[in-house]
């Protein structure tokens, strides 16, 4: 497996509230995490960084190569629980951090299968020459309205409340993540990203750049550059894994 990581402040923000990490747990396993913080510049930074650090360290300490799928699921849920408690606890202890929170999307990538967990509207995509598929489902007002048939996908892209998320890490004492299982074949890519990317590029644009970009680090840069040419009002982060 190979991977490429890029996070950019964008064109408007004065700080980068996104955080990300990729860790090799063994020669056949990668852990990838992307978080998009909220709650003001300073506390957004704290929330996303805390969530990434705590989640990653908990998985690193718990992971064993012979884990089965159910055990991996529980390990990721436990890591999310600890990350959520840590961010929430900090927000309650320090006035300047009150109300902070973060999205989280994580993937444990192995040749035998990939497990994805998400909270909020940072996303995971499966990408191949056959097309692009969004693995995760956003926890957002817009997604609820889409599910109810109140918005079309085209209307959703420009809906004024599109940044309102219905679930986050650290805003409540407990949170739940959704888990997805994917069998990713050789030649398939996994993309984790914040909404700073997906708010400005549609799925087909992402597919084109990933499949046709010769250099994948340059591909990540190209995705970010397109977002910045369109104004990039938010931070932009992407993690791309090639199997």
Image: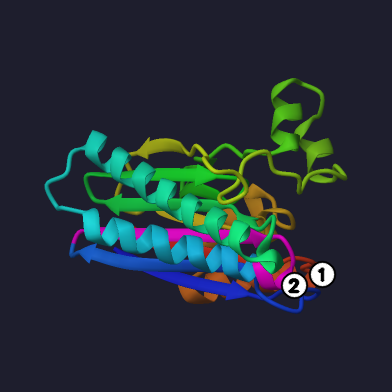
From the viewer's perspective, is 99 left or right of 64?
Answer: right
Residue numbers of the magenta segment: 28-43
Q: Which corner quadrant of the image does residue 21 belong to? A: bottom left
Indicate the quadrant containing the N terminus: top left, top right, bottom left or bottom right: bottom left
Percent from the top left, x then y, of residue 80? 43, 48
Name which residue lies at 57% across and 51% down.
170
Calculate the distance from the C-alpha at mark 2 to the C-alpha at mark 1: 5 Å
- Residue under circle 1? 231
Q: Which corner quadrant of the image does residue 72 belong to? A: top left
Indicate the quadrant containing the C terminus: top left, top right, bottom left or bottom right: bottom left
Given residues 158 and 91, the one toward you in this image is 91
The answer to whether the residue labelled 2 contacts the one labelled 1, judged by CB atoms less than 8 Å apart, is yes
- Residue under circle 2? 228
Looking at the image, the residue that sits furthest to the bottom is 14
Residue 153 showing in the rendered view: yes
From the viewer's perspective, is 44 left or right of 173?
Answer: right
How packed mark 1 is, by other alpha carbons closer than 10 Å (few <14, some 14-19, many 20 or more), is few
Name which residue lies at 74% across and 58% down.
200
Percent from the top left, x then y, of residue 103? 58, 52
Percent from the top left, x then y, of residue 41? 72, 71
Looking at the image, the residue that sits furthest to the left is 66
Q: Which corner quadrant of the image does residue 236 belong to? A: bottom right
Residue 223 showing in the rendered view: no
Name which residue lies at 59% across and 62% down.
93
Q: Secondary structure at mark 1?
A: loop
* Residue 191 located within the stretch drawn in magenta: no
Name which residue lies at 48% across and 39% down.
177
């Amino acid at each position: 497996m190979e991977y490429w990581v890029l996070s950019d402040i964008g064109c408007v923000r004065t700080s980068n509230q996104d955080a990300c990490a990729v860790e090799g747990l063994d020669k056949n396993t990668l852990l990838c995490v992307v978080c998009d913080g909220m709650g003001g510049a300073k506390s957004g930074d704290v929330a996303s960084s805390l969530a990434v650090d705590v989640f990653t360290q908990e998985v690193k300490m718990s992971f064993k190569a012979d884990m089965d799928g159910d055990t991996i699921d529980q390990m990721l849920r436990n890591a999310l629980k600890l990350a959520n408690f840590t961010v929430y606890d900090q927000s309650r202890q320090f006035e300047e951090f009150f109300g902070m929170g973060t999205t989280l999307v994580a993937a444990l990538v192995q040749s035998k299968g990939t497990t994805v967990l998400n909270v909020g509207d940072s996303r995971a995509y499966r990408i191949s020459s056959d097309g692009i598929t969004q693995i995760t489902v956003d926890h957002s007002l817009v997604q609820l309205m889409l599910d109810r048939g109140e918005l079309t996908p085209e209307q959703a892209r420009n809906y004024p409340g599109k940044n309102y998320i219905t679930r986050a890490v650290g805003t409540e004492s407990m949170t739940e993540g959704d888990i997805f299982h994917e069998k990713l074949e050789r030649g398939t890519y996994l993309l984790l990203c914040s909404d700073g990317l997906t708010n400005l590029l549609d799925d087909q644009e992402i597919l084109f750049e990933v499949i046709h970009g010769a250099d994948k680090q340059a591909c990540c840069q190209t995705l970010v550059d397109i977002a910045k040419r369109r104004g990039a009002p938010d931070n932009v982060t992407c993690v791309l894994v090639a199997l």
